[in-house]
Image (spheres, helix red, strand yellow):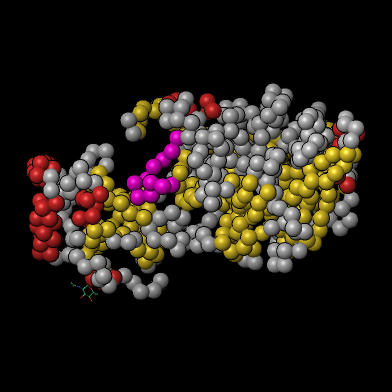
Amino acid sequence: MMMMVRLSGAFFLVAIGAVNGFPTGSSYDFGYEHNAYGAHPLTVFKSAEELEVPKLDMVQSSRACESSLYTLFTPRGGATNEAQATIVDSNGDLIWTSGWHGQQIYNLMVQEYRGEKYLTFWGGNDAVGGHGAGTIFMLDKSYNVFKEVRAAYGLDADLHDFRITEAGTALITVYEIVQHDLKEAGKNHIGPVWDCLIQEVDLETGLALFQWSALEHWRLADSYRDIGSEGEGDRAYDFFHMNSIDKDARGNYLTSSRYMHSLTYINGKTGEVIWILGGKRNMFRDLSDGAATNFAYQHDARWSSNDTITLFDNGVDDGHPNIAPTRGLKVKVNEKTMTAEVVTEYFNPHKIHGLSQGSFQTLPNGNVVLGYGNSAAFTEYASSGEVLCDTHFGPESKFGTGGVQSYRVYKYEWHGYPTTTPSTAIRRNSSRNWNFYVSWNGATEVSKWVLQGSDNITSTDEHWKELSRTKRTSFETSFGLHASYPKYLRAVAVHSEGHMLGVSTPINILSVDQLTSTESFSFTNNDISMTRIAMGMGGLLVVGILLRMGISTWNKRSPVYWQLPTKPN
Ligand SMILES: *[C@@H]1O[C@H](CO)[C@@H](O)[C@H](O)[C@H]1NC(C)=O
Ligand SMILES: *[C@@H]1O[C@H](CO)[C@@H](O)[C@H](O)[C@H]1NC(C)=O
Ligand SMILES: *[C@@H]1O[C@H](CO)[C@@H](O)[C@H](O)[C@H]1NC(C)=O
């Protein structure tokens, strides 16, 4: 079935079909994808104009996508103002967004530590040669910093990976410059090299429980990266480029090296290399004609079961943009026969070339989410490889330029209870009707919004009268202002069980009029003549009269009192 739908002035062709009983849809906003809204299209909220929120183009969608989880990503890049940690729901609607003191932000996740869920991410400087020097932040459910995690031995935490283990330790990627003989890389001197370290750190004490150095186990000659001008002065040779660490139930580590095109499986006690998959030192016989071991510049390698590994195979990088298609890869490894075999490959429907970064996540329901790193896209697949949902958070015509990018994209459950107050604004909308807008960045549990009024700003809660209530259906909720209102308005966030979660700072209606001095506020929105008179005479005087009329009208009605429960039920 095909139908035309009209959304905010533009026409989209929407195809609705049925695959496996689930309706699927696709809508490609040609203008969006070709920069009609610029290189970084934004969604602007009237109650929170300061937020930098990417407008999404949900190119393909399906009910088979996991809708109970939120999507976490970290838009940054040349077309953005500032990197943002961002959470959206399955409709693409904003849940939470925040910059981080102007720093870069990478690797936003929800992780568990001692039975509590935390938002974790890396913040710092990413301009130190393809990796980062910074700190890992753990935010609690109120978005307050619970812990700042640094690498052990006084080193900077790198941006590539931070995994909290069930034992309450953290796996951190660390880069350290060491002086090394560069003969194997083709230079006849000793020069600086970026060694890559796995550190397992006790989150309580900050002490390293384990450390593994790539340079102790790998030779420069094994790298696919030309030394070029590196290895001179302060330009260290990035020969290995570690970008993920996973620890399994056997206590061993699996790490991914971008420039070795390989995964190293490491004994968790001795640090010895158990085996290597892919690259020049590959130890596995490939049962898939090379497809199980020919990955290149890959990211995010994890065990998905005892004998199956998943990874994001970029296939290409900035210097080698056309080698192989980018894919998600699921590989089965047999450690007895030392064979490797492709289980499933996941290809992007728009053939994105992942020039850098990228992620592979297996969801609890078996679906797979790929983040395309340098290109502003994430795609959800059925386990079989079928594309279910495909979302762009920047125009496709700019993919590969890094204008808008996100190191990884993951989906998690999250419950946020911000300690801020809800944000509000009174504004006219595009059809020139006055509305009261409310939103609350990060609040996941708001079920309803209640608009309340009072003539006394210092009234206690029970003296604020309910004027209207509405279900929260998206980040910003609006109340049409049609009738007469008391002097102060505020919004109350209500939980699905009926208790109050938060209250906005009251807005004085007169101050709204002063802010928007070109347009007089009319209490009777629909009464055009009234508005005209108000606009014609222009002054506060008229508004004052209207206000008094409004208050008296409102007082004469018998208002509905809304009792605020004092405790959660
Ligand atoms: C995977 O390995 C762990 C640790 O050796 C073991 O406890 C578990 O039973 C294994 N699971 C399967 C499905 O083989
Ligand atoms: C406003 O409310 C406060 C608190 O209930 C009360 O003390 C005060 O008298 C009220 N002011 C007016 C003008 O009613
Ligand atoms: C403007 O606000 C009024 C009152 O809430 C509403 O009825 C109308 O649909 C809105 N117009 C647009 C274009 O959103």
| Picture residue at 13% right of the left edge, 43% below the top | 535
On screen, 300 above or below 323?
below
Magenta span: predominant SS is: strand
| Picture residue at 71% right of the left edge, 27% below the top | 319
| Picture residue at 70% right of the left edge, 52% below the top | 157
Q: x, y (%) of residue 8?
A: 33, 34
Side of 64 relative to 247 (left or right): left
On screen, 388 above or below 35?
below
The verdict on residue 44 being magenta is yes
Q: Is residue 107 visible?
A: no
Side of 252 relative to 549 (left or right): right
Marks counted in the figure total: 0
Q: Who is closer to the viewer here, 266 or 505?
A: 505
Q: x, y (%) of residue 241?
A: 76, 41
State which quadrant residue 381 falls in.
top right
Q: x, y (%) of residue 393?
A: 51, 37
Side of 277 relative to 354 (left or right): right
Please give the range of residues in magenta.
Answer: 41-51
Which corner quadrant holds the N terminus?
top left
Side of 171 relative to 231 (left or right): left
Q: x, y (%) of residue 223?
A: 83, 34
State which quadrant residue 115 falls in.
bottom right
Which corner quadrant holds the C terminus?
bottom left
Q: Is residue 160 visible?
A: yes
| Picture residue at 74% right of the left edge, 58% below the top | 154
